[in-house]
Image (cartoon, rainbow, N blue to C red):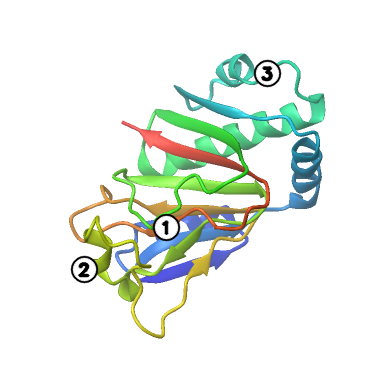
Amino acid sequence: MNLVIGDQLSCFSDIHLDDVELVSVKRQKFDSIKDLSTNFIKSRKVLKLQWHQDLDDSWAIQENLPESLDTSFRSMLVDLILESGEMLGSLVDCKKIGVRIATLRSPMCPLFHVDNIKCRMLITLCGEGTQWISNQDVDWEILLDRDNKDIPIKENADIKQMVTGHWSLLKGGAWNDKFNGVVHRSPHDEKDRLILSIDPLF
């Protein structure tokens, strides 16, 4: 299984290839997004938001984002959610998305696991990116043993990390019968993170 890295949204079409498990795209103007996100983290405010919406429903985003957010930060989130949702809709033909925005100060999912979804867009706006293990490097015996807390990775293989600021689209366990889903976890760095995840809904 392969990782595709690029700087164009068209790269996301590679997610439909059987030998691709994750596509990571570097987005333009990320420096301003990172600065806004870092300033929010430094304010020590907390975001833990989750909702469902139609792809192009900017009103739903406005309703769910706190009015207390800085105007520029709020506008950035609206644009980011609309753009990534539109991209997912064109890729997997969904009409709705699930949105989650969270500030994290400890690992949310500390153990390696697979999400039983079709796919997920993960965007780390600030802090360390999500860690993952390429499918051919996973020790499935360890992963499937719920009592075994060891890292489920084969000898001499490496844990990979999604790049902060990239849009990372990963296949889930429900992608198809040929693929088990990307094995991933939250980073164990205790530094603050701000993440946005977008799931297609069917």
Name the residue type under label 1: His
Name the residue type under label 2: Glu
Task: First in sequence, mark 2 or 1: give its number.
Answer: 2
Task: First in sequence, mark 3 or 1: give its number.
Answer: 3
Q: Quadrant of residue 182?
A: bottom left
Work out whether 72 lies above or below 12.
above
Which residue position is annotated with label 3? 66
Residue 141 disc label: 2
From where the camera sits, is residue 179 visible?
no
Question: Is 77 on the left-hand or right-hand side of 155?
Answer: right
Work out whether 154 lies above or below 74.
below
- Badge 2 vs badge 1, beta-carbon distance below 8 Å: no
Q: Which residue is drawn at 55% across and 58% down?
A: 188
* Camera-side mark, 3 or 2: 2
Count neighbours of disc 3 (C-alpha within 10 A) and say few if under 14, some if 14 to 19, many if 20 or more: few
Q: Quadrant of residue 63?
A: top right
Residue 184 disc label: 1
Residue 37 percent coordinates (x, y): 74, 41
Q: Residue at x 63, y 29 (%)?
A: 47
Q: Quadrant of residue 145?
A: bottom left
Count neighbours of disc 1 (C-alpha within 10 A) and say few if under 14, some if 14 to 19, many if 20 or more: many
Residue 130 disc label: none
Q: Which residue is drawn at 61% across and 58% down?
A: 189
Question: Is 10 on the left-hand or right-hand side of 75?
Answer: left
